[in-house]
Image (tube, helix red, strand yellow):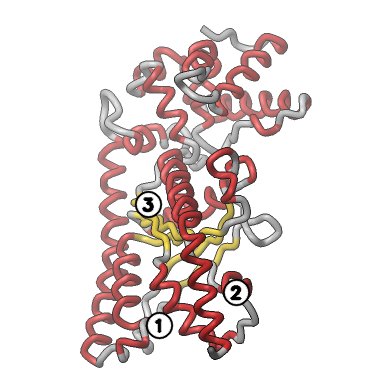
Amino acid sequence: MPKNDQLIRESVERYDRERDRYVKLAGRVADICRAVVDDHAIRAQVTSRTKSVKSFEGKVRRRVDLKNYENVDDVFRDIGDFSGVRIALYQPEDEWRAVTVLEDRFCGPVDGRVDVDKKDKFNIEEKKFYKATHCQVHLPDEDCVEDYENLLGAECEIQVCTIMAHLWNEIEHEIAYKPESGGPSGVELGLLESLGYLTRSGDALIERLLEANVARMTNQVGDFMDMHDFVARLRDSFHQVSFAQNVGRAYDDARKLGLNSIEDIEKNLGPDALDYEKARDKILAFNQYLRRRDRVELQLNPKTADLLMIGMLDAYVDKIIKFHRGGPDKGKPSLIFHVAKAYKEFTETSGGSMAR
């Protein structure tokens, strides 16, 4: 049997044996991505996929003569997209936010950091419109426990792009990328070009639509409709920062506390809760306390919705501790439980506000 044929066969057999691991990795990374975009009020659809055995074999065959693989390990090092997750955003402006939070949440192959590759191949002459950011990630060690222990060091590719860009990327890949199809005709290329322009203009229209939606919600009164309404109406109070960041936990706890409107927040937390400078100063003082006690992992971020979270901690720390205590039926206590416990200690030792 020729060397390359044997290498292909051995590689395919190994991938067939290990594919379940990559299915599990894609599912776990997708679940984390859904939580991440929700917590930062990023409008997006998250999907995952695992390369099929047939697709894997086809990719190895296309590359084997060009890459001069010596062994199966070389094949697996080169083909790193066994597990894939896509975050399809509603608007282009959220791409940098999504990538930033992914860098914070995951680790990766470059000195432990996520490998980020921003691809924008807009080229009219070549009829190219591909646009996406590719992130190669690993699960942090603390995620690789119990059922996920065998995912330690396994690599997953996360693609971040707009829904409109995803449309063009997928259709172009299906029609133009696979050489066995003989390549696209002139008519196909012309239609792909027209679709490319439509997707780019579609991105701009969606962005304008969502801006109009935010403007309308900003002027609403009464109860918050959802997290995006919550962000829109509180953004004026905290316009100096990216209030959508970390907003998930602030929104969830606000609902649990019955803070369902701006009026509820002002009535129950007091006017200081929506004062940017006072909220920021409270966070900075709390963070300084945490640093002195070597508990920096509990610090709040004064450039995010933590500005409202500190007001809720100030007024309702005991209730927040109770919400997040965990237990036999609720799982482990969440991070905010430990933050709230530390904040209670801080107020008791520093003579800060007394929680209700």
* Residue marked by disc 2: 72
Residue in the picture at 45% in, 19% down = 329
Give the percent coordinates (x, y) of residue 93. Answer: 42, 56
Viewer-nearest residue: 324 or 92 = 324
Residue in the picture at 36% in, 16% down = 258
* Residue marked by disc 1: 123
The answer to whether residue 228 is left or right of residue 191 is: right
Residue in the picture at 51% in, 20% down = 326
Residue 46 image label: 3
Q: What is the C-alpha distance between the residues marked 2 and 3?
A: 32 Å
Quarter of the rendering containing residue 160: bottom left
**Identity, as a three-letter code, of the amino acid under mark 1:** Asn
Give the percent coordinates (x, y) of residue 219. Answer: 28, 34
Viewer-nearest residue: 59 or 222 = 59
Between label 2 and label 3, give the one nearer the viewer: 2
Between label 2 and label 1, give the one nearer the viewer: 2
The answer to whether residue 272 is visible is no
The answer to whether residue 240 is visible is yes
Between label 1 and label 3, give the one nearer the viewer: 3
Quarter of the rendering containing residue 296: top right
**Identity, as a three-letter code, of the amino acid under mark 3:** Val
For the residues labelled 2 and 1, say whether their Cβ atoms are less than 8 Å apart. Answer: no
Residue 267 image label: none
Viewer-nearest residue: 8 or 329 = 8
Query: Mark 2: few, some, or many residues within 10 Å (few <14, many ≥20)?
Result: some
Q: Secondary structure at mark 2?
A: helix
Viewer-nearest residue: 82 or 92 = 82
Q: Secondary structure at mark 1?
A: loop
**Identity, as a three-letter code, of the amino acid under mark 2:** Val
